[in-house]
Image (cartoon, rainbow, N blue to C red):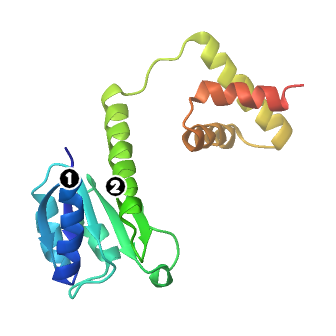
C-alpha cells in the first residue's frame, strides 16, 4: 500500500483530506503544515505521494516538489488561477473546489503509474528479434523520406507515439508503415 503524506498550510484542510483518504483505505502517516515538515516526512518513506496545497509559510509547491525525493509524486490541489506554465514532472493537478471522487481517482491513477514505472525498471529493456528491428528500421526510413526527419527524430517520434498511446515501439512502427508506406 502506498503511503500518502498530506501537506496543507491550514491544519483543518489537512485533517479533512486525511480523513477522506483514511476512510477510503489509504495509509496517511503524516499531516504537515509546512514544506519542511513534508520534506522530512517524505524522506522517511521509501515510496509515496504528497497531497499538497499551493502555498506554505516556508515555500510554494514548486519548491516543495524540487526538494522532494524523486521516488515521491505530488498531487497538487489548488485554484487553477494560481498556476503559471506547465507543471513540473511528478506533479498532478486537481482544481479547487475539490471533489472527493476526483481526488480518489487521481490518487489511484498516480499509484498505478508509479507501479507501471517500477515494473518497467525491473524488467529492463528486452531484446528485439530481427523482424522487429526490420519493422522499426523501415518505419524510420519512411519518416525520414516522407517527413524529412533525421534518423534520431524519426526514432524519437515513434518512441513518443508509443508512450502517448501506451503501445509498443513495434506496434507504432507498423502503424507508420501502414500510414506512409505506399
Question: Which residue is tagged 1?
Answer: 26
Residue sitting at 59 percent across and 29 percent down? 169
Q: Is residue 130 left or right of residue 154?
A: left
Residue 35 placed where, x, y %? 20, 76
Q: Nearer the viewer, residue 78 or 23?
A: 23
Q: Nearer the viewer, residue 23 or 143?
A: 23
The number of numbered badges drawn on the structure is 2
Residue sitting at 12 percent across and 73 percent down? 37
Asked if marks 1 and 2 touch (Cβ < 8 Å), the reply is yes
- Mark 2, other Cα within 10 Å: few <14 / some 14–19 / many ≥20: many
Residue 29 placed where, x, y %? 10, 59
- The quarter of the displayed image where residue 30 is located: bottom left
Looking at the picture, does residue 114 appear above or below residue 84? above
Q: Is residue 134 left or right of residue 31?
A: right
Q: Secondary structure at mark 1?
A: loop
Residue at the outermost front position: 23
- Mark 1, other Cα within 10 Å: few <14 / some 14–19 / many ≥20: some
Q: Nearer the viewer, residue 127 or 81?
A: 81
- For the C terminus, which image quadrant? top right
Residue 156 placed where, x, y %? 61, 42
Q: Secondary structure at mark 2?
A: helix
Looking at the picture, does residue 7 appear above or below residue 110? below
- The quarter of the displayed image where residue 40 is located: bottom left
> Marks 1/2: CA distance?
10 Å
- For the N terminus, which image quadrant? top left
Question: Which residue is tagged 2?
Answer: 107
**Disc 1 or 2, which lies upstream in sequence?**
1
Amino acid at each position: 500500500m502506498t503511503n500518502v503524506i498530506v501537506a496543507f498550510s491550514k491544519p483543518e484542510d489537512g485533517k479533512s483530506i486525511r480523513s477522506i483518504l483514511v476512510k477510503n483505505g489509504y495509509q496517511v502517516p503524516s499531516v504537515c503544515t509546512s514544506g519542511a515538515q513534508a520534506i522530512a516526512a517524505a524522506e522517511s518513506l521509501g515510496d509515496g505521494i504528497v497531497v499538497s496545497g499551493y502555498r506554505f509559510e516556508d515555500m510554494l509547491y514548486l519548491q516543495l516538489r524540487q526538494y522532494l525525493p524523486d521516488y515521491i509524486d505530488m498531487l497538487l490541489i489548488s485554484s487553477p488561477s494560481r498556476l503559471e506554465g506547465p507543471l513540473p514532472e511528478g506533479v498532478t493537478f486537481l482544481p479547487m473546489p475539490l471533489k472527493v471522487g476526483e481526488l480518489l481517482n487521481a490518487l489511484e491513477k498516480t499509484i498505478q503509474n508509479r507501479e507501471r514505472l517500477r515494473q518497467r525498471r525491473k524488467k529492463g529493456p528486452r531484446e528485439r528479434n530481427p523482424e522487429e528491428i526490420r519493422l522499426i528500421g523501415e518505419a524510420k526510413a519512411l519518416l525520414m523520406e516522407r517527413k524529412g526527419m533525421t534518423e534520431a527524430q524519426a526514432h524519437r517520434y515513434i518512441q513518443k507515439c508509443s508512450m502517448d498511446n501506451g503501445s509498443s515501439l513495434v506496434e507504432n512502427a507498423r502503424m507508420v508503415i501502414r500510414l506512409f508506406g505506399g
